[in-house]
């Protein structure tokens, strides 16, 4: 018997990756995706993630998972954090470095938050994956968001320079998905809502 | 006959100021205040303002006004913008300057957005007030948000250094309120929903 849930995303590549990772070991989990237009709120990464997942459960009427990504600068006490996509869009890779010109500390962490809700009205549970690193002048292909300016500690490579397989194993996203997978495997195989 | 509306704020000083300005000239406008816990969304200052006012009208079941403030750096294409409160809280006055250390352009604008909704389901109308200036090392009392680091063009003083009367006449907030006042005066004196 399989569990069934909806991954709220408009990105079919993300769906594929999530399906693959969540189905490793244990019993299979059936995942559909649905693209929804949900406003993201302002607040901490946890508040942002919970609000989105809560709303997704209401809209889908189903158990569901949502995903959020943040890039947090140590010198800015975690900001831009959940707002990084706006900074990336407005100032680009060079600007993401320039923001730190006045600060000695270039450390940053990439944070992925998966949220799971068992259904409408069920408080979301969060699974956070965090990868420590630093902000550097862009290296590698510049096609995927801020990957070119984030160098995980001990790798001497930016996310953008890494082979996909290497990145997947140390990425904030993979760490969060691993936690989500472990949790889902503990749920009863027979979904009572099915 | 007077119009009646609700100003959504938990700040009694703001209520007093808004009452005073909106009642200048013309017919009086009755304003009550109500403190509501409304999540702010991420997005442009206009999207943020509209979403809050739309929600406020639903929650109050009444005509209402809401207010939003942003501080927009020219070098960052308008950011931090609606997120300025988080940056102020996390990095303080010095950090607000340090963010621009890597950029020549220190220009910024303070933006106030009042939103008015005639009631639940009525699309909010926006009234924006914008004051041009630049980001400077803090001068004047540091008690009120980022006032000490924003120097409006042509004044040689930061908001924090100005006498209240001078600030009120050139502030982004006053400009937005003036537009709102002018609009409210054009509405029929007899509120059909009363």
Image (cartoon, coloured by chain):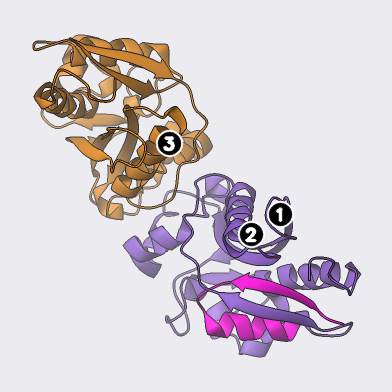
Chain colours: A purple, B orange
Compare residues A175 and B153 and report the one nearer the observer: A175
The residue that label 2 is drawn on is A57
| Total tally of numbered discs in the picture | 3
Q: What element carries label 3?
A: helix
Using the rendered view, name the quadrant where residue B179 is placed.
top left
Mark 1 to mark 2 CA distance (whole Å):
9 Å
In this view, B23 is above or below A134? above
The residue that label 1 is drawn on is A124
Q: Is mark 2 on a helix, strand or loop?
A: helix
In the picture, which quadrant includes the N terminus of chain A? bottom right
Mark 3 to mark 1 CA distance (whole Å):
25 Å
Q: Determine which of the numbered discs, if any, sits on residue B179 in the image.
A: none
Kindly identify which chain the residue marked by label 2 belongs to.
A
Do the residues bearing badges 1 and 2 touch, measured as CB atoms within 8 Å?
A: yes
In the picture, which quadrant includes the C terminus of chain A? bottom right
Residue B108 within the magenta-colored segment of the rendering: no
Mark 3 Cα-neighbour bin, 10 Å: few <14, some 14–19, many ≥20: some
The residue that label 3 is drawn on is B58
Instruction: Give the residue displayed 33% in from the left and 25% down from the top.
Output: B147
Q: Magenta part of the protein: which range?
A: A1-21
Residue A18 within the magenta-colored segment of the rendering: yes
| Closer to the eye: label 1 or 2 | 2
Using the rendered view, name the quadrant where residue A174 is placed.
bottom right
């Amino acid at each position: 018997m399989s569990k069934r849930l909806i991954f709220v995303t408009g990105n079919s590549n993300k769906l594929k990756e999530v399906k693959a990772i969540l189905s490793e070991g244990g019993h299979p989990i059936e995942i559909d995706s649905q693209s929804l237009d949900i406003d993201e709120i302002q607040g901490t990464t946890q508040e942002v993630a919970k609000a989105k997942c809560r709303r997704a459960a209401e809209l889908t009427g189903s158990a569901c998972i949502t995903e959020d990504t943040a890039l947090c600068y140590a010198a800015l006490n975690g900001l831009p954090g959940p707002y990084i996509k706006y900074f990336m869009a407005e100032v680009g890779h060079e600007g993401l470095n320039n923001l730190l010109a006045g600060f000695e500390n270039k450390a940053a962490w990439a944070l992925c938050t998966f949220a799971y809700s068992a259904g409408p009205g069920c408080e979301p549970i969060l699974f956070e994956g965090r990868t420590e690193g630093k902000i550097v002048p862009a290296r590698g292909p510049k096609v995927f968001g801020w990957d070119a300016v984030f160098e995980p500690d001990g790798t001497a490579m930016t996310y953008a320079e890494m082979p996909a397989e290497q990145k997947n194993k140390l990425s904030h996203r993979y760490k969060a998905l691993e936690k989500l997978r472990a949790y889902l495997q503990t749920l009863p195989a027979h979904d009572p809502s099915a």
